[in-house]
Amino acid sequence: MIVSKQTVFHLTLAFFLLPCAAAWSASRTDDGSGYGPDVVLSFSRMDTIQLPSAGKICGVTWMGPDTLVVLNDIPDSLSESGEREVRLVFQDSAGVILRMEDFTGVLDRGLAWDGEFLFSCGDADDGSSILYRIEPDTLMVEEAFDTPGNHPCGMCFDGRFIWITDRDTGRVDRFDNEVGQITRSVVTPGFSPFGVAYDGKYMWISDSGSGRLYRLTGARRRWSATVDTESFMMRGMDVLLLHNGESFWYLPEGENLAIRIQ
C-alpha cells in the first residue's frame, strides 16, 4: 500500500466491486535509506464506510473480510433507555447490522480481533484498566487481564501479538495472549498516542497531541516515517485506525465514517 523509494505494495479493496490500487509516497528522506523520522509520506482520501450513527465510536476492528465489529458508546441523551449504553455492534461493509450485544459497565475503549478472540478494555473502580478476552460466538468474557497503563485507547493485532496504545504514558504496549501478559512497551513518537493499526509490514500510530500519523518499522517498532500535515493533521482529535489486510482506514473523532486512504 506504500510507495517509497524502495518498495511498492499494491493492495485491493475486497468488498468493493472495483478494486483500487493504493499508493503512499515518500517525499524526502534523512539519509537516503527511506527510513527515519525525516521521511515524509502523503496520501489521498478515498471511499467511506458508514458506522453506527448514534453515540461515539470508541473501538473498531475487522472480523473477516466483510464484517466490522464496532464498540459504540451511546450517551444517556441519545439512548432509548435514558441511560448510557455501550454496545458491541457487528455490521457488514454496507452498514447492515448483523448482531448487537450490550456491554455497558464492562467495555469502554479499544477493540481488536486476533482471528480467534475479540479484545477490548474497560475501566475498573480503582481507576485502572482491564483487558478483556471475549469469545466471539457467545460474546462471553473468557478472561480478564490487568494493563500497565490507565488509559488504553486503540488496539490492533500484528499476527502474533495484540498492541495497545496508552495515551497517558505515551507508549504502545504488546500483549501476548499465550502468556496473558504485557511483554513489551515501546515509547511512541508523539506524546498522546491513540489509534494503532498494522498493515502486514508497518505499524501506524495516530497521536492526539501532535495531530500526526506516524509509521513504525520492524520488531523494535522504530519510528521510520511521518505523514505530511496536508494529508493528516488532527491535533486535539482522537483518531482510530483500522486495517483489514488489504486497505487502510481512519475514523476522525465525532464522525461515524471510516475513511479509506491511499
Image: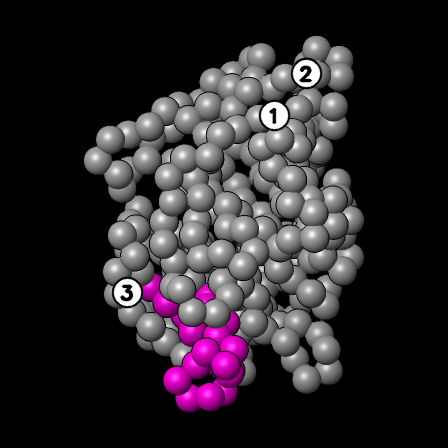
**Dot 3, how many residues are within 10 Å of its Cα: few (below 14), some (14-19), or many (20+)?**
some
- Identify the mark nearer the N-term, 1 or 2: 2
Up/down of 168 relative to 259, above or below: below
Secondary structure found at label 2: strand
Residue 219 visible: no
| Labelled disc at residue 41 | 1
**Mark 2 burial class by Cα count in 10 Å: few <14, some 14-19, many 20+:** some
Relative placement, left or right, of 39 versus 66 is right
Instruction: Write down the residue under mark 2.
Output: 28
Query: Gap between marks 2 and 3, in whole Å?
Result: 43 Å
Highlighted magenta segment, given as a residue range: 71-90
Query: Which residue is label 3 attached to?
Result: 97
Q: Is residue 126 visible?
A: yes
Q: Position of residue 46 (x, y in %)?
A: 41, 35
Q: Amino acid at mark 1?
A: Leu
Upstream in sequence: badge 2 or badge 3: 2
Q: Amino acid at mark 3?
A: Ile
